[in-house]
């Protein structure tokens, strides 16, 4: 099947060779191409500029290789994330990524947008779990990096460049992960504090202790400056070890000034709900902002996001991955107030970028994209990102406009 045999503009290759053939033809014709997986994250990042074709991984859903005894699995990039986890669960294993639960999302899409959740504190992100991949570049060239064993020591980790690249470097066709045994037990506790300062102090103490929490999440009770906060902490593993961890984490929270501490009855459900906060805010009026900063600056990050949410109308939620240096805003915006937030967003972006952090607008109404960029300045990384983009996609044909690279 040739690229010009379809009038729809949407291409669903059946294998890697077809991906290569289509991208080669598009390259020769100088066509702009949208690269996507299950289409569940098309609203992330800057809106694309004009494109001519869409190529998806909808039919690249196969299990390539699975070695449970080696704790590795290789799948095609279009495999639904839920199916991958079900395959691993049958062997008592899991891929310890916990992105927001979006129906139909693919493993390739999760990698391309670098989505993760609370358990990154213990297990790391996709960069820690991906050990190899195969991909097709804009000119149709097929490449690979890493391998199918955990111990890869030769060459560059080119596969990690695709994580968070939003499909702007090439199309993933096959990925290999190291996986882990499913924990016997997951326990979650909640500590309530009358101030954000105390909640973040407790989180830092938990992170620096000899305890091993799998998640530390600080959630503001409301958007007022003196709002109280809840600290969710989790531990997982053997039941007896988890009980000891939870006792220790509870004691740290009490010493840091918690008003109350309780263990939640259904730990897995509570952790899943925290991971799925993003999926509870859907629609074109949603603004989603992420600030990355040092742990000691997280209270300031939350305060900045709360101020933005208040200016937007106050219908929102602010929370932090307190052990990972990330703060998030999820908010429904009143259209008439969008313009009023631009100065606040620019001020917060400048503040955190000056300390080596970042402010990223992950989702926003169309009106806001006309006035502010999703990413801001890339700083010292900008030159490297530009060079990589020029090397992988010299004509800038893939997902044009999504990243502010020229």
Image (cartoon, rainbow, N blue to C red):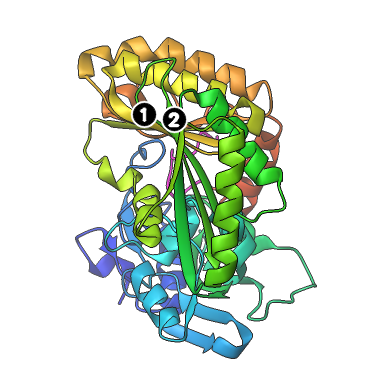
Name which residue lies at 57% across and 32% down: 200
Residue in the foreground of this view, choosing between 300 and 257: 257
Q: Position of residue 58 (x, y in %)?
A: 31, 69
Residue in the foreground of this view, choosing between 32 and 388: 388
Residue in the foreground of this view, choosing between 132 and 229: 229
User: In what element is the residue under mark 1?
Assistant: loop
Name which residue lies at 65% across and 45% down: 207
Q: Position of residue 133 (x, y in %)?
A: 58, 71
- The quadrant of the rendering that contains the N terminus is bottom left
| In the image, residue 207 above or below residue 16 | above
Q: Position of residue 273 (x, y in %)?
A: 34, 51
Q: Position of residue 168 (x, y in %)?
A: 50, 50
State the mark number for residue 229. Answer: 2
Is 399 included in the stretch rendered in magenta?
A: yes
Q: CA distance from mark 2 to mark 1?
A: 5 Å
Q: Is residue 329 visible?
A: no
Q: Quadrant of residue 76?
A: bottom left
Is 284 included in the stretch rendered in magenta?
A: no
- The answer to whether residue 237 is left or right of residue 156 is left
User: In what element is the residue under mark 2?
Assistant: strand
Q: Is residue 213 visible?
A: yes
| In the image, residue 96 above or below residue 390 | below
Which class describes the residues within 10 Å of circle 2: few (<14), some (14-19), or many (20+)?
many
Residue in the foreground of this view, choosing between 401 and 214: 214
Which class describes the residues within 10 Å of circle 1: few (<14), some (14-19), or many (20+)?
some
The residue stretch that appears in magenta: 396-406
| In the image, residue 264 above or below residue 131 | above
Q: For mark 1, what is the residue?
A: 221
């Amino acid at each position: 099947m040739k690229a010009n045999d379809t009038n729809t503009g949407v291409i669903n290759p059946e294998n890697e060779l077809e991906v290569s053939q289509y991208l080669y033809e598009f390259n020769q014709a100088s066509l702009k191409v949208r690269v996507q997986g299950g289409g569940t994250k098309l609203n992330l990042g800057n809106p694309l500029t004009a494109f001519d074709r869409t190529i998806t991984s909808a039919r690249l859903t196969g299990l390539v290789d699975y070695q449970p005894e080696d704790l590795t699995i290789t799948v095609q990039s279009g495999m639904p994330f839920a199916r991958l986890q079900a395959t691993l669960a049958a062997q008592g294993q899991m891929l310890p990524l916990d992105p927001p639960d979006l129906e139909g999302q693919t493993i390739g899409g999760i990698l391309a947008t670098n989505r993760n959740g609370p358990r990154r504190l213990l297990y790391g992100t996709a960069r820690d779990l991906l050990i190899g991949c195969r991909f097709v570049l804009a000119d149709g060239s097929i490449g690979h990096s890493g391998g199918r064993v955990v111990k890869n020591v030769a060459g560059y980790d080119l596969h990690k460049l695709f994580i968070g690249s939003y499909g702007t470097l090439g199309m993933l066709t096959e990925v290999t992960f190291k996986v882990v045994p499913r924990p016997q037990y997951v326990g979650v506790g909640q500590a309530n504090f009358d101030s954000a300062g105390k909640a973040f102090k407790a989180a830092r103490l938990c992170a620096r202790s000899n305890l091993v929490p799998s998640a530390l999440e600080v959630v503001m009770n409301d958007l007022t400056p003196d709002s109280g906060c809840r600290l969710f902490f989790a531990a997982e593993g053997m039941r007896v070890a988890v009980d000891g961890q939870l006792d220790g984490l509870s004691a740290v929270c009490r010493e840091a000034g918690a008003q109350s501490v309780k263990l939640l009855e259904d730990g897995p459900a509570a952790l899943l709900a925290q991971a799925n906060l993003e999926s509870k805010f859907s629609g074109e009026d949603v603004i989603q902002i992420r600030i990355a900063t040092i742990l000691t600056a997280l209270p300031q990050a939350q305060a900045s996001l709360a101020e933005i949410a208040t200016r937007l109308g106050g219908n929102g939620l602010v929370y932090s991955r307190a052990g990972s240096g990330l703060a998030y805003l999820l908010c429904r915006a009143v259209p008439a107030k969008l313009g009023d937030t631009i100065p606040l967003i620019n001020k917060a972006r400048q503040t955190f970028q000056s300390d080596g952090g970042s402010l990223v607008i992950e989702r926003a109404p169309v009106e806001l994209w006309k006035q502010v960029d999703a990413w801001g300045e890339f700083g010292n990384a900008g030159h490297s990102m530009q060079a990589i983009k020029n090397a992988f996609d010299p004509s800038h044909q893939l997902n044009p406009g999504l990243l502010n690279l020229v």
